[in-house]
Structure formats: C-alpha cells, structure tokens
Image (cartoon, rainbow, N blue to C red):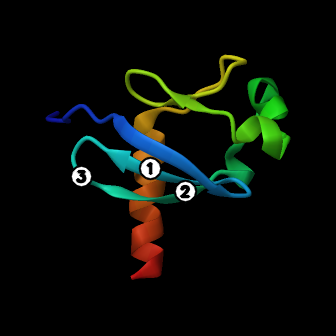
Amino acid sequence: MNMKAIWITEAKHLQDYNIYIEFNDGTSGEVDLKNKLNGPIFEPLRSIDFFKEFSINAWTIEWSNGADLAPEFLYDLVIAGKAVSS
C-alpha cells in the first residue's frame, strides 16, 4: 500500500459549518461539516461560535475541547465535493 502522508496547511472558516481547506499536496476546497459532527466530543461544535474557533495542529484542524478530524477524512470530503461540482 503506497499512501503518501496528507496534512492540512491552511484552513479558514467561510460560513455556517463550511471550511476552506488546503492540503500539503496542493489540493484545496470547501467542506461542509454540518452533518459530520456526530458523537459526544463534537456536541460543543454544534454551536457555530465554538465551531469557528478551530486551529491547525501539525496535521489537521482541532478545537479546544480536543475534537479533531482526520486529514484523510477531510481530504476525501474535498475530493467528493469537487466530483459533485464538476
């Protein structure tokens, strides 16, 4: 299995639960996370004010309560979004 490491190099909140993300391989796009915030760790993120307050760690976006999303998961959402919009 030859998978290259992927990580987030830039991210900015756009509106609602939409974030624009850029990855280390040059791929970029928008993700809508509104229906992806499942489980107790993500409950606080349902508040848009809390959701907007993410930061970038060494590889992905994270929130102050410890919630984060795998960069591969976000990458797949960006790719899927591009396929839908093409």
- Using the rendered view, name the quadrant where residue 47 is placed: top right
What is the C-alpha distance between the residues marked 1 and 3?
A: 10 Å
Q: Name the residue under label 3.
A: 26
Residue 51, percent from left and from top: 73, 39
Residue 56, percent from left and from top: 48, 29
Q: Mark 1 points at which residue?
A: 21
For the point 36% across and 56% down, the residue is 28
Quadrant into which the C terminus falls: bottom left
* 10 Å crowding of disc 3: few (<14), some (14-19), many (20+): few
Q: Which amino acid, mark 2?
A: Val
Figure check: 55 above or below 28:
above
Labelled pair 2, 1 in contact (Cβ < 8 Å)? yes
For the point 40% across and 73% down, the residue is 83
Figure check: 58 above or below 54:
above
Q: Name the residue under label 2.
A: 31
Residue sticking out furthest to the bottom:
86
For the point 81% across and 41% down, the residue is 49
Q: What element carries label 2?
A: strand
Figure check: 71 above or below 36:
above
Q: Nearer the viewer, residue 5 or 30?
A: 30
Quadrant into which the N terminus falls: top left
Q: Which amino acid, mark 1?
A: Ile
Badge 1 or badge 3: first in the primary sequence: 1
Badge 2 or badge 1: first in the primary sequence: 1
- Using the rendered view, name the quadrant where residue 57 is placed: top left
